[in-house]
Amino acid sequence: MLFARVRALINEWVARLPDEAAADIAARLRSPLDDVFRSAFWELYVHELLVRCGFSIEIHPSVHATTKVPDFKAVRQGLELFVEATVASTAAETRASDARTGVAYDELNKIDSPNYFLWVDIDSSGPAAPPLRQLRTEVELWLKTLDPDDVLASVVAAGTADAMPRLRWAWNGWAFTIGAYPKSRSARGIAGIRPVGIYGSGEAEIIDDRGPLLRRMRRKASRYGDLPLPYVIAVSGSTFTTNETDLVDALFGSDAVRVGYALDGTVRAQSARRPDGLWRRAGGVGAANVSAVLFVPYIEPWEVAKKAPLLVHHPGAARPLAIDCEFIWIGEVRNGELEWRKPRRPICDLFSLSDNWPGPEGPFEGVNS
């Protein structure tokens, strides 16, 4: 029942689009690619949000002096603005990297290794496919220099697999560490046994949700030049770790600490922001053509009744946006500080949904019962 309600809501929202736009969104919503689905749903969500807030919407309006068109032109009681909906995603790059990594594992499984299982760590991946045949040749030559009985004796004496010999190989951003673990004597020389027996965990990564937000907003900020109306970028994150702090850091600059010395020699530290944001750059105000940013950190279709959007106004906008909405968070800079005004009504009311929609039952109740 839960998923039927979500599907019905999506169908209802799609039906409010013009026919051509509805067909495009529906096709993208059916995509097996997660980032394509998220982009389509976010565009649909922003359209529905604007409609519910009383705007009439023109899809892909023409803009003077450019052939590029923003997603929406919204009009309400004399107020006109352009809106561009986008998702800050690195999914395409991630998929390409994962594909290259998969090819690397497949190629390593072609290695002639009658005496060893291979422990493979891909410590880092490069921007282009590595010369895997060369890697295979080097690994095979290296394995021939090893004596499996000697290696096994070393591992047993040490009491840990860490004592196995390792080959490290690097090329254009790629780094492989390949360990050789001796097969049992009965398994040596048997054809058809895949040599890669252990896949390492790979490189550790620092989660960066600010970076994708900033890159995507910068791209959209410069896409249409100087528009004749207020311009809003509606952006959402593509990972559940994205939050409001990531947006603030992307707009106003990343957090820093300024350290100074007082006249009495004491050290004083205070929080500061680097001039590396969309709206705060070295030399002054940035992206003044972007009047505001509409933001939901991360949203699934079944969360629309629970997550209220944020609208952050540019303090130095060339075309300030005189807009308010009782259902969303409003962020404005006052006296050098970003202040938030809470929604006066819950977001579920805007979408005419209950506060526990699509419930009340739990997400998996009734499945296979």
Image (cartoon, rainbow, N blue to C red):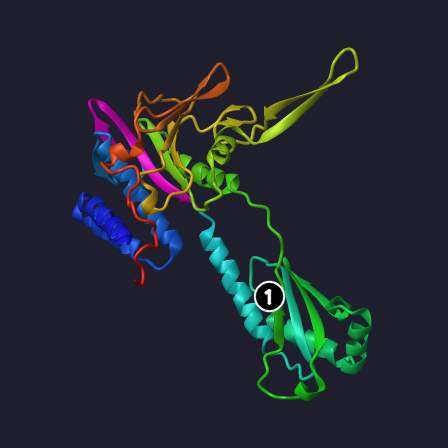
Q: Residues within 10 Å of mark 1 (few under 14, many from 20)?
A: many
Determine whether 204 is above or below 350 in the image.
below
Which residue, given by chain and number where applicable, does mark 1 sit on? 130
In magenta segment, residue 150: no
**Is residue 83 rendered magenta in the image?**
yes
Point 53% across, 69% down: residue: 103
Image position, residue 26 (x, y; %): 25, 53
Q: Position of residue 288 (x, y in %)?
A: 42, 25
| Left or right of 285 on screen, residue 35 | left
Say left or right for 264 vs 278. right
129 up-or-down from 250: above or below? below
At numbered mark 1, what does the secondary structure look like: helix, strand or loop? loop
Q: Quadrant of residue 28 in the image?
A: bottom left
Query: Main structural element of the magenta stretch: helix, strand or loop?
Result: strand
Question: As drawn, which residue projects farthest toward the front?
Answer: 369
Q: Nearer the viewer, residue 216 or 266?
A: 266
Magenta-colored span? 71-88
Estimate the x, y position of residue 333 in percent, counting from the top left. 45, 19
The part of the image, by quadrant, that contains residue 313 is top left
